[in-house]
Image: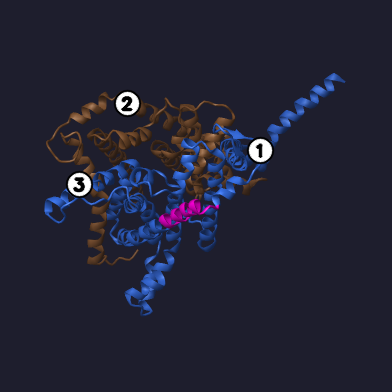
Chain colours: A blue, B brown
Amino acid sequence: MATDSREKRRFNFSGLLIRLREDSKVQGLALISPTLVYLIIFMIIPMILVVVISVLKRGTYGDIEYQFSIENYKRLIDPLYLKILTYSMWVAGLTTLITILIGYPLAYYIARVNPRQRSLLLFLILVPFWTNFIIRIYAWIMILRTEGLLNNFLISLGVIDLPLDLLYTPLAVQIGMVYEFLPFMVLPLYTSLEKIENAQLEAAADLGARPWRAFLRVTFPLSVPGIVAGSILVFIPAMGMFVVPDLMGGAKTMLVGNLIRNQFLTARDWPFGAAASMLLLLLTLAVTLIYTRKAGFGEDLLV
Amino acid sequence: MSEKKPSLFLRIYALFAYAYIYMPIVLLMIFSFNTQKLNIRWEGFTFHWYKELFQDQDVLLAVRNTLVIAIISTLAATIIGTLAALALQRYRFPGYTISESLLYIPVIIPEVVMGISLLAFFALIGVRLGLSTITLSHIAFNIPFVALVVRARLHGFDKSIEEAAMDLGANELTTFWRVTLPTILPGVMAGAMLAFTLSLDDYVITYFTAGPGSTTLPLRVFSMVRFAVTPEVNALSTLWVLTVFIILAIGQMLQHKNRNTTTKKERIK
């Protein structure tokens, strides 16, 4: 009887190995399991934790009291915080729009030059893209601050007498955001514009369309996936951005990212910060869904 | 796209656009040689700040930390992510859709949210914040990016070479090691490079998961920009930009060589 069960166990183990070799479902699961385990531990559980914390209360000394309460969400409806939220959406939306306006002609140009120039031009876009963004923001701080390069330049030219107050204003934040996100918009735009086949444009010309018309009715609609992909790559990080307002904005320019960061690190009100994060998350999910429902995800543009 | 040369307007526009993109960086680099400490007016040329940089223990430590974290997280994320890409691209299994969606989450989540969730997580399980928590967090956001890139490159993969190998007697492991892996290697390398750069540059998630003693280069640059603005920051930034420039240039030249050799082979045929 004992040998019977031992034999059974041995059979089951080699049975598993056999299934691994033959059954493609098991193979697939085996390959994806490290990812699943890792992401469940380090992504799903932390997110669930945030949801849980958002409905708890803040203790007197900044710790968490395990009492259920939706107080935090009620606090968020306060006009003060709603203003921060809408301001963040405004800044992110404006950044997206401006980067599209600036980036589209640039991407269009790159897509139309000859291949040799093209790789050089792309390379020149990639260098700032891969440069750490704090460095790029610092460059603008150097330019915009009161004793900065721009003011010195204008004063030496005699255009102004007193230095302009440019840094630590909403304008500075906007400039920083646009500068930071421009490459993120240009690259997907370029990819989708480059994919437009010559044949389609020639067909339009053959059918009698003037260049402007061909652009509006052929090129532009075909480049929409690029616009969508670029918008997602700009809008969502811009919504959660707190570094640019932190370095270039003043006391008046607080975005959602700053709010969340403050709650977690300075004010030590984790439940409130968690609730604000949930709100931010829901907003970005909503925007992503709206965008992708209209024009797909555009992951083919990443290649 | 069209063979027609772009109009003059577009060319001038592009020139201005590139000037706008590069002017701040160039100014930054120029002023790294300024003798004046406050860096308000140009006073003279010096390498002094570069010397300071190489003696700055905080910066050197930060560089070391950043590289270690980047290398470890890239290795782990590349392995796990490539396996995931293979799984998603070639197999069907229960939980396929969930796994796929799981991989998209870090891509569409704002970094702040991911950062605080990890902070809360580590606090909950009582792990002290430090280099290890940073590394674990970097692996988490790198896996989906590697998987995304490798998946995209797997699209045109021709399974018949694998079948040929197995017909010739190789078992699954040998086939994978000597046929599959070499073929997908360019894609895997691309994914690894992306993960490496993302880890190197990361500020937000690192900010939330770093402990008091563990600083990385982005964190250090931030505090230097915030608090100690001397041309030393310019020097550090200049070196960083130059490093990116050189690495990208090498990558570009390698790609070019690849393209040239393949076309030559086709011509011989």
- For mark 1, what is the residue? A67
The residue lying toward the viewer, choosing from B85 and B206, is: B206
The kind of secondary structure element at disc 2 is helix
Residue type, mark 3 in image: Leu
Q: Quadrant of residue B57?
A: top left
Main SS of the magenta segment? helix
Residue stretch rendered in magenta on the structure = A77-92
Q: Residue at x 41, y 71 (%)?
A: A218
Residue A271 percent location from the top left of the image: 57, 40
The residue lying toward the viewer, choosing from B84 and B229, is: B229
- For mark 2, what is the residue? B60
Disc 3, disc 2: CB below 8 Å? Answer: no
Foreground mark, 3 or 2? 3
Q: Can residue B238 be seen in this view?
A: yes
Q: Residue at x 59, y 29 (%)?
A: B125
State the mark number for residue A156.
none
Q: Can residue B77 be seen in this view?
A: no
Q: Quadrant of residue A158?
A: bottom left
Residue B76 percent location from the top left of the image: 50, 32
Q: How far apart are marks 3 and 2 (CA)?
A: 29 Å
Vertical placement of A6 versus B82: above or below? above
Q: Distance between the residues labelled 2 and 1?
A: 46 Å
Residue type, mark 1 in image: Gln
Residue B191 percent location from the top left of the image: 45, 41
Tell whether position A85 is magenta. Answer: yes
The kind of secondary structure element at disc 1 is loop
Chain holding disc 2: B
Disc 2, disc 1: CB below 8 Å? Answer: no
Q: Residues within 10 Å of mark 1 (few under 14, many from 20)?
A: few
- For mark 3, what is the residue? A149
